[in-house]
Amino acid sequence: MKSVLPAGLTLAALAALALVCPMPHSVLAASTPSIAISVEHATPREIEETTQKVLTRDYATAWQTMTEALDQNRADLLSANFIGTADDKLTATIQEQTKAGLHQHITDHGHSVAAVFYSPEGSAIELHDTAHLQIDVMDGSKVVHTENATVHYVTLLTAAENSWKVRVLEAVPGF
Amino acid sequence: MTKHTEVRVKFGGMMAIAALLMCCFAIATHAAEINVPATITAGSGLTIPSSGTGSATLYVVGPGTAIKRTVQLGQEIQLSADELQNAGRYVISLDGSSATFFVTAGPVQSIAFLARPSRVPADTPNIVTGTAFVFDKYQNLVLQPQPVKFELTVNGQTASRTETTKSGVAFAKLDSSRKEGPAQFVASSGSASVRRVVQEVASDPCSIRMTAVRDKNGILARTDPIHDCAGNPVPDGTIVTFTSTDAKGKSTVDARIKQGIAEAELPASTGATISVASGVVVGNEIQWRGAQ
């Protein structure tokens, strides 16, 4: 009995601490979204199974990273998954959000993705992504816009050293 | 007042309050309506009419843009070309109401061109590939179909093909020319043009012919100048294998082409069969007799 009581107190203290103290970043991080990629219609080169797996992993991670970066206004998160134009434009968005005191909270409900182009030499892949998102535009803690939206994206990824990085990410009215 | 009358009066009052609330809600909804076009072209700016009086906070969030600005209701709201230069989806919120619109790319201004490989054998079909991504002046991918011309020129010979972009990308496969040399590979669309150089080199030898003579250390075997089937000299450094087979066994020498020919010194023999090959091409065979 003696040993149970201090253990119970310790657990209670830890629970109280968890409520008071801010949680570490890794705990707050958005989860990896669900991504379903079909590769049957990719031309002119066929996408190999291994490439499809890596592509799915890297694209999901890119969305997770972007979601966190736009929510926390942290452009430093982007370079691991974004490059070129996409990196530049997302960085600019975050800089402008920071200046205006805004941020975006995106709840990612999943993506239906079709690979439509795989370059003959294997260095670039283009995707058509239909994303289901809840988008909240926040002014500090105040929600100024909220919506559940289905958004279509044209995405271009290029091969980096050991991963695929997003080079272009453009929302479009439709495919 | 009877109980029935009391109930009627209370019910009537509640209806009046409900009607008033609905009326207020309708007015508020009407006042906050935002009229924006569904799509605009990148860098063209936007004027949005507003209604009502007093000031309100305008929010615009899109690719590369996040605006929070106080505006006067009843006046036109201006979004500049700079604020709407990136293609994508924009959210606009004013006075509690929201709308979305898309910015689409303008005319083609630049091309990202992938040309592979950098070195190819001459006279080979569908060996050179070019992939072109077309962008406007704000680096937006141009998604409207655009013609892209691919041209491969070497020593005055040109092979060209025009393809139409699909979702911002076009690609072509072209034959290498019969003559070796540095080929200019150009992709162009509208006013944009990008050039790459593809080195075309001789392909495999077409045939190999050798002769053999006695020298002081044995037999000297030497090829004639080696060309591919289009007449291009096979590059120096290409390996040519000479083989001599006699009663004692087999001797093999790998020699590199120097200044168009290859030669090798083989062991002396009174009777041997000497052969020559490079890659998959086999040359002539010589029956060596000691007296030669």
Image (spheres, grey):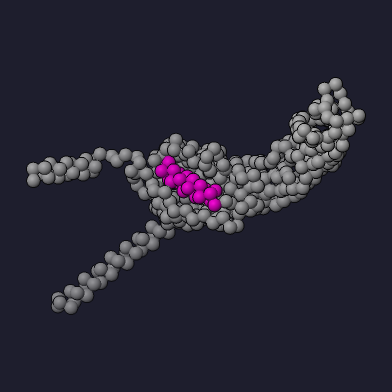
**Residue that sits furthest to the front in the current view:** B247
- Left or right: B75 as drawn, with respect to B213: left
- The residue nearer to you, when weighing A88 against A83, is A83
Judge whether residue A171 can be spotted in this image: no
| Image quarter hosting the C terminus of chain A | bottom right
What residue is at 44 percent from the left and 53 percent from the top? A34
The quarter of the picture where residue B44 lies is top right
Total numbered labels: 0
Could you say where residue B177 lies in the image, as x and y percent from the top left?
Answer: 81, 42
Q: Residue at x 65, y 47 (%)?
A: A120
Looking at the image, can residue A30 be seen? yes
Q: Is residue B233 depicted above or below B20 in this figure?
A: above
Give residue B89's position: percent from left, percent from top. 51, 50
Q: Where's residue A44, x and y in %?
A: 65, 52
Q: Is residue B96 magenta?
A: no
Q: Nearer the viewer, residue A140 or B134?
A: B134
- At a point 36% along the width and 49% down the height, the residue shown is A143
Residue at the limit of the structure toward the left, as seen here: A2
Measured as percent of width and height from the top left, residue B179 is found at 83, 39
Region of the chain picked out in magenta, as a range: A49-69
